[in-house]
Amino acid sequence: MPHELKPIKPKRISDQVFDQLRELIFRGEFKAGEKILTERELAEAFGVSRTSVRDAINKLVVMGLLDQKQGQGTFVRLPESSEKSVLATMVESQDASITDLLEVRMGLECNAAALAASRAVEKDFQFMEKSIEEMQKEVKSGRLGNEADASFHMAIAYATNNPLQVFIMKNFYDFLFTGIKVNLEGLYKVPGNIVTILNQHQAIYQAIREHNPEAAHGAMKLHINFVYHFFGGRVGD
């Protein structure tokens, strides 16, 4: 007996608008706290109705990615403070340390790098390159470059073509770079560390660019081990 086949349903216009806006937020193209275009401007840019834009924005508000402020406009939501973050609450209740978080990150991101090496397309490579370039510019300007660092890892998450991987990593990085910002700043401020991290990013990118899952996995493992070692531990030699 043949398998039951279901008719293909075309994707709603509002869902396509939602997908594009969500990607811009997750990739860091729309920065936290930034005011986005008005409904009218977005409708004109997308070439769709304001109703489709409104539906997409409402969905993003419900997801906690956008905030609508009466009389001011729509803004990219700032990451939750450590007092409000669900992840922060869980970490605190389980008495978890930053090294515990990095062990989780090891599993998530080594797998992500390997998947990205198999699935990445030219668009993904462009975002990785842009993040590396932005981090280099930030460092030369005397800043930490941590936002560009997060964007690089989010670009890898997107290259997995797995929406759950992207969503989990977005929440994970919001916590890492906001909830425990003081700890991470210590990593970036040690002389030579940023150069090392940039070189490691380049090695990860190159392995993914060459579509070499094993090398990408290994390069990411080396990178996270470096961070882990800074905080007093080591994950799997």
Image: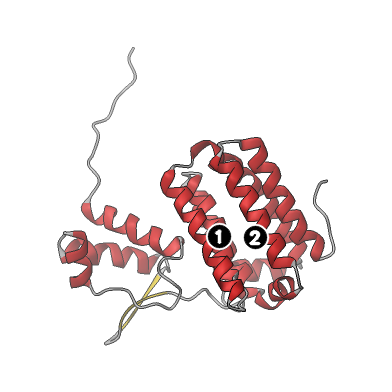
Mark earlier in primary sequence (1, 2)? 1
Which percent across, then down, holds residue 173? 58, 64
Colour scheme of the picture = secondary structure
Residue placed at 53% from the left, 51% from the top?
A: 157
What whole-number distance in Å separates the C-alpha atoms at marks 1 and 2?
7 Å
Q: Which quadrant of the view contains residue 201?
A: bottom right
Q: Residue furthest front?
A: 140
Name the residue nearer the viewer: 55 or 48: 48
36, 134: nearer the viewer: 134
- Mark number for residue 198? 2
Residue assigned mark 1: 132
**Residue 117 found in image quarter:** top right
Measuring from the top left, give residue 177's x and y in whole percent.
61, 71
Residue 141, x across and y down, in percent? 58, 77
User: Is residue 94 visible in the rendered structure shown here?
Assistant: no
The N terminus lies in which quarter of the figure?
top left
Instruction: Identify which residue is drawn at 41% across, 48% down.
Output: 123
